[in-house]
Image (spheres, grey):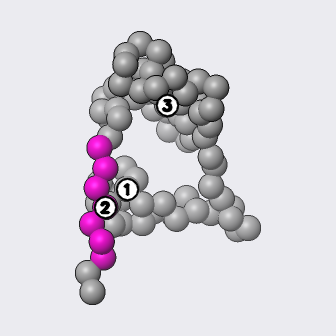
Amino acid sequence: MEPKQLEYTPIFKLNECKYTSCYCEENVYLLCKNFLQMGENTQQLPDISSSAFAVFITSKNKRAEIRAQKAGKGNLHSTVVW
C-alpha cells in the first residue's frame, strides 16, 4: 500500500520570509507576524488576530520529527528530526 500523497499550497514563498539560522523561535514569531499582517492587508484571510496561535512541538527527549522541512530537500515524505 503506497503512502497517501500530501498536498498543500504554501501561503508564503520562501524568498518572502525572513530567516535567521539557529533562531527558530524568532523565525516562528516573524512568520506569524507576516501571516497576521497578510490578513489585515488583504481579503485573503479572515480576521484571525484574536484567535491565532503557534504551537511548538517537542518530546520528552526534546526532539521532534517533522515532514516537509527545507532540510529534507523539499520532499514531503522525508522526515527531519530536530
Tag shown at residue 68 = 1
Distance (Cα) linking label 1 and label 2: 9 Å
Between marks 2 and 3, how big is the CA–CA gap? 22 Å
User: At which x and y percent is residue 17?
Assistant: 40, 28
Report helix, strand or loop for mark 3. Answer: helix
Which residue does the image show at 42% across and 20% down from the upper left?
A: 38
What segment carries the magenta color?
3-9
Residue behind mark 2: 6
Disc 1 to disc 2: CB gap under 8 Å: yes
What x and y, as percent, mark residue 82?
55, 58
Q: Is residue 73 left or right of residue 45?
A: left
Q: Is residue 8 magenta?
A: yes
What is the CA distance from the residue labelled 3 to the residue labelled 1? 16 Å
In this rendering, the answer to whether 71 lies above or below 41 is below
Q: Secondary structure at mark 1?
A: loop
Residue found 28% across the figure and 55% down from its top? 7
Q: Given the image, on which type of amino acid does mark 3 rest?
A: Leu
In the rendered image, the vertical position of residue 10 relative to residue 71, given as above or below:
above
Q: Is residue 34 visible?
A: no
Q: Earlier in the sequence, mark 1 or mark 2?
A: 2
Residue 41 magenta: no
Which secondary structure class fits the magenta region best? loop
Whether residue 13 can be seen here: yes
Circle nearer the N terminus (3, 1) = 3
Residue 31: mark: 3
Decide: is 73 above or below 54: below
State which quadrant residue 18 falls in.
top left
Amino acid type of the residue tagged 1 in the rendering = Ala
Q: Residues within 10 Å of mark 1 (few under 14, many from 20)?
A: some
